[in-house]
Image: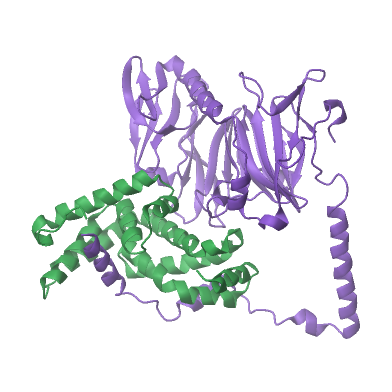
Amino acid sequence: MDRLIKETLADKAGEIEVPAGAWEQVRRQIAPLPARPFGFRYRLGAGLELMAAVAVLLLVVGVGLWRSAPGAGEAGIRTVPPGLTVKETVLAAERDVAGDLVQLRGLTPASPPDDRTKADRLKLANEALAPFGYRLAQAAGSGFDLYRGSEVVLAGFPNFGPVSVAASGDDFVFRAFNPAEQDWLVQAGGVREWEHAEVMRHDYQPPVYVGDDLVAVRWEDALDTYAVWRGNEQVFTVPLTQPAFGNEVKRLVSWAGHWVLEVQGDVYVDGTSLRQQFGYDEVFEWRLVGGRPFYLFRKGPQVGVAYDGQVLPYQYEQVPHYLCCEPSQLNPIGGDSGVRFYGLRRGDWYWVEVAAVTADGPHPNAKSDSASDRLCVEESRPAGPLLVAPCQESGR
Amino acid sequence: MGLGEAELVRRCQRGDVAAFEALFARYSRRVLQTAYLITGSRSTAEDILQEAFVQTFRSIAQLREPQAFPGWLLRIAVRTARRYMQQESAMHRSAIKAAGAEAGSEPAPDNQVVVRHAIWAAVGRLSDQRRIAVVLHYFEDRPVGEIADLLEVPEGTVKSWLYRARSALAAQLGQESWGGGDAHG
């Protein structure tokens, strides 16, 4: 049967050929203006051309000096806000790996907090569900079971999203799912299947409660436009200008009475763009880490890290994101209690682990400084001694 | 993918349209055929071809691994096709079903052709996900793991889709169409 299906499809595929003029149609869209025939070079006289070359050289040298200036993204011990730990591990020099994340993955140390993250997630969800009489539990085989009282109302689903609760405490909503095979939306009133077409229309983002309103992001009829609906009212639209890998909508989160939407390199809080508000070139990986906002941003040549309203003393020239293909697609990765990513700084690739301090204590790699009640973090180098310094001497 | 193609990709990343034309020449037919098999519509397949390549050029700077270009392009094409199917689901569903029904009703000169027409008709009746999985597996020769990665679902899900698709094809065609062959492939 396999052979027959294969032959049939090959046979049908042979019925269609690329139409004449197809390339021209594509070319017109990707390069609407005629290519410039090196006008710069030909228009300048010999003297000006020399001056331009010198200017470019000076610019290159200047940028090189600036990039190597002490303190520009220097690694070492840093002070970070209470409630957060950051660990950087140098993995390899860029000249050795040329940005190959597959190689970097091979050098990446195992990350200890995984199990704790999973347990935390379950605990957080159950705290939210308890007033409604629901409870999530590890299933006997794998995945999870959802109980209402003592009755299992949904069994054996592999994953679930965060629980969003209405301000009045009257309802909640969360997504339980068997990835791309079956989805369910769970609310106080019960469990209903979330049809696949609807899941895709919402780009896999379930609605969240903001106050007592259900807020949802939905792909609208006009191609490449997402809209945010608050109850029955459309409150925001965002056109998509670039294709993405994975989902275009990265997340829809309810936070402190606001809705937060990350889509295509910008984050909108109640419709206000963080990119515009703070003059960033790009904002990505917005998450609540330990209940507080975390995000990465690019401003000019540097990628910075922000947490709980503060810009942290960490900068990178590159943090690959929104990329194809695996493992690039999986950078950064994170959850409710932390974010991890590869970052390039001054010729070295770092594995950066950002983690919230939970009830179970801080990140295993964090050093506590009881004098200041701040957490200091060590940078480790696999091939050399750990760099450890007292907290008082740290910070920039 | 040879080294020459990796170099073409790097040139595209620097905005070289001529290099992109070379990639278009190599891959456009395959993208078009895949889109056609998924949607069952010639005009939609042509639209997908165009949009997929425009998107590819605009975002090619995001591709860190030039050797991954073919898979990446296929990912964009499939994603574009899924988007078209979502947007105009009723239209495309009817398009491929109509194509399948038409194929199934044509007079057939021999038994093998009858079977192929019947298979195409049955493919048209598969759900979108299963049809995409079938096309990627049987036409694009993509292994299950790669399809899973491409569609962002677990391998078990793809295996399940393919199994169910084969079962559905067999059920819809009837065992006699296979001349006693293995209905589950």
For chain B, give the colour. green
Identity of the residue drawn at 60% across and 58% down: B64
Coloring scheme used: by chain
* Residue A104 located left or right of residue A180: right
* Residue A7 located left or right of residue A31: left
Indicate the position of residue B106 as horizontal and vertical percent values: 14, 71
* Residue B180 located left or right of residue A271: left
Indicate the position of residue A246 as horizontal and vertical percent values: 50, 50
- Along the line of sight, the residue nearer the viewer: B56 or A344: A344
Indicate the position of residue A226 as horizontal and vertical percent values: 50, 48
Q: Which picture quadrant has residue A143?
A: top left
Q: Which picture quadrant has residue B141?
A: bottom left
Identity of the residue drawn at 89% across and 66% down: A58
Q: According to the colouring, which chain is purple?
A: A
Quadrant where the C terminus of chain B sits is bottom left
Identity of the residue drawn at 10% across and 62% down: B179
Eyeballing the image, is A345 above or below A382? Answer: below
- Along the line of sight, the residue nearer the viewer: A40 or A357: A357
Question: Is residue A307 at least partly visible in the picture?
Answer: no
Q: Which picture quadrant has residue B178?
A: bottom left
How many marks do you count on the picture?
0
- Along the line of sight, the residue nearer the viewer: B102 or A214: B102
Question: Is residue A293 at least partly visible in the picture?
Answer: yes
Eyeballing the image, is B68 above or below A148? Answer: below
Indicate the position of residue B155 as horizontal and vertical percent values: 38, 46
- Along the line of sight, the residue nearer the viewer: B94 or B35: B35
Eyeballing the image, is A391 above or below A263? Answer: above
